[in-house]
Structure formats: structure tokens, C-alpha cells
Image: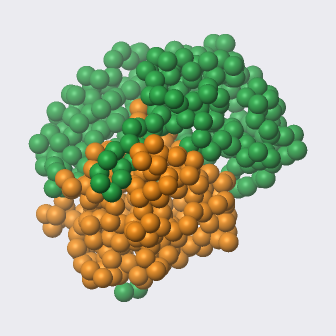
Chain colours: A green, B orange
Amino acid sequence: MTTTKELTEKLASLVGDVPDVTEVVELAALRPEEVLRRNEKVLADLARTAEISLEVDKGGERLKERTVYRGEDGGRAVTFHASGAFTLLSGADPLDDLFAEVAPDDVLRKAVDSVADQLGLTGFVDKEDTLAFERLWKLKAAGADREGKLSDPVLTRAVGAYRQSVRDLPVLGRSSASVEVTGSGRLSQLTVTLRRFAGDGGGSTLEKARSRKPDEAAADVAARLSRLLGGQEEDVVLDAQSFAFGYLSLGRRRAQALLAPMYVAAVTVDGGPERERSAHVIAVTGSEQQYLKLPTGVRPTATPRVA
Amino acid sequence: MAATFGVEAIRHFGNARANGISTAADLTYTFNRSNGFDEELRDAGHSRAWYWSEQDCWENDIQDSSGGGDDATWVDTVDLFWIETHGNHTADGQARLLYDTPQDQWRTFSGTWELGENWNAEWVMAYSCDTAPLGTLTGLWNIFNRLHLYCGAWEEMWDGITTDECGEDVADNLTDGDTVSSAWIDGVSDWYFDNHPVVVGPSTSQTWNGGSVIWPLSTHNRDHLWGEGSVTADLSPSQQGCLLWRWAEG
């Protein structure tokens, strides 16, 4: 029902302007001990500002990929050793301190921005980079009784997602930062996943890379989806949801030496009401030369089943 | 007290496609997630009962034994069951999951599930698209026979480079002491692509409170993984006064 040509054209139409040349940017290579030292100071300041009881300087529990700090009132902080990403949680029960009503988005936006400002979120990136609001998320709850009577939905949390840009290009991937607030406007959770953190160093231009054309990258995405579908893409509806050009941040458990241009596509596959739907995020290189090695799908560690 | 868990994960669907059963695409990061979930839980001292992949995952593992399935040997013997495959739902709100081999069927329908009973299951986590749409969630009520929570998606769940660590994230949240509902919603969310997480489960008439739900009493607010915090009491169907759900939307 959708040809690879149609998908390619749709994707290419979504991407907007792509610069002819993009800088490949060096990232600081911090050892886990340096990451922990940096984050412990940042987390102590953040916890104090957000009035979260957490004595980070007493040290945390060092696990394989993360170090976890716990406070007496349920507060918690986590640092990811490889990436330097961190989270801070207040320990508030998830269904306490709800919003009195499902407030309009502009009101919720002010609530998350206000907490982000208090925490000094934009100060986490160097002056030549930016960290800007990207999207508002809402956590809600509702229910029904045995007779089918529905309760009114309640808004439990609002989440503001923020995106880092370097050299005027977004660093794509999970949100660069997210701020979750309660009904009374208190911070319940902060996540920070920045590949360039203020003061870390790095940032030099390693190379100037010639960008690939959007239609060429889109054709790569379509070809990859065709392989995933066993060549049966014309039996399904392929819907291109987005196609973005920028840098890419890998997962929180991965170190990364540089920022390089990438295209990131989001495509849904619909086999119809009697069959299956799926959703695929596919990244392909944004430059003629590939600089960043993407994570691959791994084999299962499952054991064979004996019937 | 440690939890026991089982894992089933399917990445390739070539057999289902070749037999004309489905047009489902293969996935890419299935085992990144399921391996990560398994490893993090085991590293924290929880106990894996089994981990099956690809065509070793069978439809009758979750089907109730009274209807010819074998949940009493598999899904209903563990506290927590993680499954990753393609999903969808029926018009009356049954979750539907696809397998790559017909053992006994190619698809399971949640109308054939009945979890908890006198066995063990507390929580089911399905990393699959669209198994629990918001408009028909009460169609899942039959699965809760002392099962506490079903964690699924109300529309798409994404397979890609921003969700390859979701299995580890959910497991880490659980073992760090988050509630089960928060562990799922936060763990599968990258706050970039919309993974539509939803958590569904029954509570008492006291919690329902005539429709003015007392949310702090809900299973969503109180249930943690065994050994990581409090766990609410099992609710038999006669003790269930309401079905509650919690979700994220962007």
C-alpha cells in the first residue's frame, strides 16, 4: 500500500533545510571518577534548591554502570558513568500532590519552565550552546467502576522536555533534559542527558563534513524498513511521522567521543485492524563519511527451550 | 524477599509473514531491551525463572489453563512477566499479541488470560504497540484474578536508538525502589518519541470512593517489586470495586 519511493519522498519533504557542511564536534572524554565528582557537586546544589533531602557528599552505591545516591525521605539521584547523564528524584509518591484540575498547556508550560529556571537548567550548557523547551508531556490517571461509570481524569504530573543545540543543530535522541513537576509546583524528577556539559571542555571542530542530501538519506531509511518487512512494504501503510537532521546522542549507558551529523526518521507501520502495527526510529548517517557508530540489535541471551 | 520473573521476546517475524498470518516488520532492538531487563534484575538479586526468545515464545504460555493454555506452568508462576512482540487490540478492548510460531495459536487474545488466581503473577509488562487503548481499557478486566497491574501501551511503542535501553531503565527503576507503575512509565519514556505507556489495574470500592478516587490508596501508588518496597494485597474479582489506569501523553 506504500511504496519505498512514496516513503522516501514523504520523508524528504519533512526534513527542512539541511546545511551543506556540518562540523564534527569533539566531546570531552571524562573518566567515571571525573563524571561522579562533577555530578556530585551539581546534584548537591540541585537537591538543596529543590529542597530534596539528599546528602550526595556521603557517597553513593556504585553499581556496574550507575552510581545511586539515596536520601532519608525517599529522594534519589543517579549518575550514569559512561555518558555523565543524571537523574534527581524527590521521592514524592507518584499519586500524591496532584493538580487540582487539568490545566491548559500554557499554564503547565509556565510551571515546568519556572522550576527549570529555579534549577538553573540553561546554565548546564556552555554559552555557545542552547537548551530550549521542546515539548510538554502530561501524566494522567482515571478509572471506571463495575457499572462502567468513569471517573474524571486527574493530572498527576507535568513534564517539560528540553533540547540541547550545538552549532545551531539539535542534539537528537532522548530529551536533553526533562523537568517533572507536581500539582503544587514542586520538582518530582529531573533528568539531564547532555553530551556537552558546561565547563567540561571539548568542543573543537574535528572536521567539516559534507552533508548527505535528504532524499539519499530517506532512501536509506526506506530500504532498511523494506528489509525489516521482508520486502512486503506494499502490503502495509507506512506513515512517515518525522525526519530530522542534527547531531545524535546515544543512550545514557554509552560513552561518545564526538557529535556527528545524522538523520533520524520515525515511521509507523500499519498492517490494518486485523494485523499488527509497529513504530520504528531509524537513524542514518547525515554526512558522506560516517563518523559515529550506531548501536546495533544484539542477539538474545535467552536459553533454548526444550519442549 | 526477591521477585521471580520470566521474559519472552520476539524480534523476527519471518515465519508469520511467510505463512500469510501477518505483515509485521522485524524489530531491531528487542534483545537490547529484554537482555538489559533480565541482566539488571538478576544483578540486583532477583530470580529469573525463564527467558525464551523468537519461536521459543508460545501463545499458550499466557493463556489460562482452564481454557487449554499453560499459564499455570509459565506466566502465572512468576511475579513479573516481561514480553516484547507486536501488539494490537480488538474492538472490545482485548489485548492481542503476535507470535512467530503457532503453539497453539499465532496470536494470543487477553480474553483468554486470567492471571493471579492461586498462582503467582503480580505484574505483566508488554513492550508492544496498542494493546491497551484508553477508550476500551475495561476490556482488560478479566485478566485480573489477583494480578495487580498490566503495563502496556495505548498507541505505538517505538523500536529505535532512543528506546534501546528501556529494558534496563525499567529494571533499574524497579530495583531503585520506584513503584511498578512509575518504573514502567518513566522507564519506557525518552520524552522525545511518544511511547504511550499506560498501567492498568484494579482497586477496591474504598479507593474508588464513588468516583472520587482516593489515588494514594491505589495499587499504582503503592505497589513495588518484591523486596524493593511495599506490595499491596492481592484482590480477588469480588474485592475489585474499580479498574484504574495511569498514562503519559505528549
Q: Nearer the viewer, residue A253 or B193?
A: B193
- Residue at 50% from the left image edge and 52% from the top image edge: B207
| Near-viewer residue (A209 or A269) | A269
Residue A58 point in image, percent of width and height: 88, 44
The location of residue A8, given as percent across then percent down, is 23, 32
Residue beneath the point at 43% across and 21% down: A104
Q: Name the residue: 60% across, 58% down.
A: B224
Which quadrant, please, contains the C terminus of chain B? top left
Q: Is residue B93 left or right of residue A154?
A: left
Is residue A69 among the parts visible in the rendering? no
Tally of numbered tags? 0
- Which residue occupies the extreme bottom position in the image? A307
Q: Which of B11 and A212 lies nearest the eye of the viewer?
A: B11
Instruction: Please determine whether, in this image, residue A251 is positioned above or below residue A17.
Output: below
Q: Can residue A99 be seen in the rendering of this structure? A: yes
Residue at 38% from the left image edge and 26% from the top image edge: A244
